[in-house]
Image (cartoon, rainbow, N blue to C red):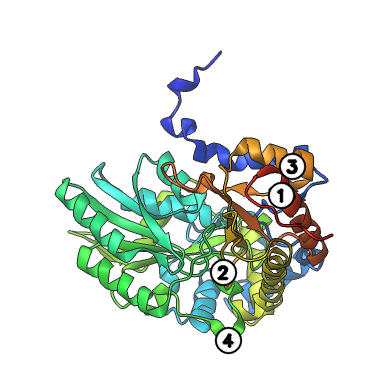
């Protein structure tokens, strides 16, 4: 049977769904290029992973601390499991210890990556076509793609270096109300957004929570990159500041452990009430949705992550310290190489931001940055990056590209920036500077 693409779900025509596949194809065609494209963790950390040891550690925990018989504990790793997960207590402990989030384990759902958490939260929260999701523009494709799959309308709110523009967000809430709609939730990544690299100040965090209360929306907080903050520069998450249960907090072990585990989590402590059924945490509703999506997160993968947490006394900070150091070093190497090879704020219109953490730097060019320019960069100069337009709603970001530093070593970063400088010098026409070396 031949299927006409136009008869499939409308999201499949949205470029956002194709963007990750497109980048993978380009990367596979140019294996020798230095790739600033993937926001993937550095592979050096996979060398030391001993999944058997972690699984064994988690089995001991099930027996010694949760009181299961050894045979039962073993079976728990192989059977279907509870839809909220096997490691909810460990996750709740870790969040309490490191993030100051007083989450009850009953409010935690362990998910197949942060991606599933986004899908579950949106599915459960959005009831009618009048409900809209506000996102910072640019935004992570995982959230905009999930919204498209679910036919949820988005409102794009400009991002400043200090996170989503609160005045614009307030204006969008009011405009939605005038149009008979409502901003049901707002997705933000307060600590180093992907791809913008923005970070909210403490004051903006507090103001966002006040606005959420005033305009009656929920905040969906994604904290994938918070761990990359320098040790002396941590700021409280929105969830840690949340006194009104307004924040649904999404986390992932993709970066602090490894992405192949596909383990993430969501803290959903909102109280859901209905006549007759009594009150229960929103997490239970998410678990009900999960039952119809992935049923449960792989118990074996949870055991590996659980073992890693236990080896680090349930401290996410301890678990991620070496990784945070490496990403801080790489980000500094990338910014430093850009400074040396391109100079700052070039008259030709080339500029870039300097995030304090996260994986990404955004570069603005004097020429449109599209997929064709990426092909040129890959084929002629051996350097890959991501066009920022993939992350924008509407026609914005056409003059920007994203560089990711997470996957590379300092020498590769240096080589990549040298190639990038040659590419910019010859292809953008806006810069006459020389790229030494
Ligand atoms: C902003 C953001 N959230 C979440 C994730 C991780 O998602 P997952 O746990 O599904 O791999 C990423 C990974 O790239 C990300 O950039």
Disc ID at residue 219:
none
- State the image coordinates of residue 323 (x, y, percent, origin top left): 69, 72
* Quadrant holding the N terminus: top right
Q: Earlier in the sequence, mark 4 or mark 2?
A: 4
Q: Earlier in the sequence, mark 2 or mark 1?
A: 2
* Callout in the foreground (4, 1): 1
Mark 4 touches mark 3? (CB < 8 Å): no
**Marks 4 and 1, how far apart at CA:** 38 Å
**Displayed quadrant of residue 372:** top right
Ligand 1 found in image quarter: bottom right
Label 3 belongs to which residue? 378
Label 4 belongs to which residue? 232
**Marks 1 and 3, how far apart at CA:** 15 Å
Label 1 belongs to which residue? 425
| Secondary-structure class at tag 4 | helix
- State the image coordinates of residue 143 (x, y, percent, origin top left): 46, 51
**Residue at the extreme bottom:** 232
Q: Nearer the viewer, residue 44 or 63?
A: 44
**Marks 4 and 2, how far apart at CA:** 16 Å
| Secondary-structure class at tag 3 | helix
Mark 4 touches mark 2? (CB < 8 Å): no
**Marks 4 and 3, how far apart at CA:** 38 Å
Mark 1 touches mark 3? (CB < 8 Å): no
Q: Nearer the viewer, residue 79 or 246?
A: 246
Disc ID at residue 355:
2
Classify mark 1: residues with Cα within 10 Å, few (<14), some (14-19) or many (20+): some
Mark 4 touches mark 1? (CB < 8 Å): no
């Amino acid at each position: 049977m031949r299927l006409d693409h136009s008869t499939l779900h409308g999201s499949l025509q949205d470029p956002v769904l194709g963007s990750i596949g497109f980048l993978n194809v380009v990367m596979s065609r140019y294996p020798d290029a230095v790739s600033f494209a993937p926001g993937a963790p550095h592979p050096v950390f996979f060398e030391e992973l001993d999944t058997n040891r972690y699984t064994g550690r988690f089995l001991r925990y099930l027996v010694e601390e949760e009181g299961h018989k050894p045979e039962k504990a073993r079976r728990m790793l192989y059977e279907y499991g509870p839809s909220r997960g096997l490691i909810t207590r460990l996750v709740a402990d870790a969040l309490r210890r490191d993030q100051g989030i007083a989450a009850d384990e009953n409010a935690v759902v362990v998910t197949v990556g942060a991606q599933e958490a986004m899908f579950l939260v949106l599915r459960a929260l959005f009831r009618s076509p009048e409900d809209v999701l506000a996102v910072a523009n640019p935004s992570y494709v995982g959230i905009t793609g999930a919204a498209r799959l679910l036919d949820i309308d988005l409102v794009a709110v400009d991002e400043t270096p200090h996170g989503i523009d609160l005045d614009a967000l307030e204006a969008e809430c009011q405009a939605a109300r005038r149009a008979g709609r409502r901003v049901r939730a707002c997705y933000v990544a307060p600590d180093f957004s992907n791809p913008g690299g923005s970070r909210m100040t403490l004051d903006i965090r507090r103001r966002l929570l006040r606005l959420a209360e005033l305009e009656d929306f929920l905040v969906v907080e994604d904290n994938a990159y918070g761990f990359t903050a320098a040790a002396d520069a941590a700021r409280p998450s929105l969830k840690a500041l949340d006194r009104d249960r307004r924040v649904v907090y999404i986390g992932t072990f993709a970066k602090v452990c490894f992405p192949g585990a596909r383990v993430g989590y969501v803290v959903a402590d909102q109280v859901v009430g209905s006549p007759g059924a009594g009150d229960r945490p929103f997490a239970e509703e998410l678990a009900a949705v999960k039952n119809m999506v992935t049923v449960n997160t792989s118990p074996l993968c949870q055991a590996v992550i659980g073992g890693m947490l236990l080896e680090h006394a349930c401290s996410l900070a301890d678990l991620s310290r070496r990784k945070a150091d490496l990403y801080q070093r790489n980000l500094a190497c990338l910014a430093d190489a850009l400074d040396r090879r391109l100079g700052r704020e070039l008259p030709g219109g080339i500029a870039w931001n300097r995030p304090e953490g996260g994986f990404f730097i955004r570069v603005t060019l004097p020429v449109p940055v599209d997929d064709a320019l990426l092909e040129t960069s890959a084929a002629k100069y051996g350097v890959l990056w991501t066009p920022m337009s993939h992350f924008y709603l509407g026609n914005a970001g056409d003059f920007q590209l994203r560089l990711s530093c997470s996957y590379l070593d300092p020498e590769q970063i240096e080589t990549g920036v040298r190639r990038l400088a040659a590419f910019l010098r010859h292809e953008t026409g806006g810069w006459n500077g020389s790229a030494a070396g």
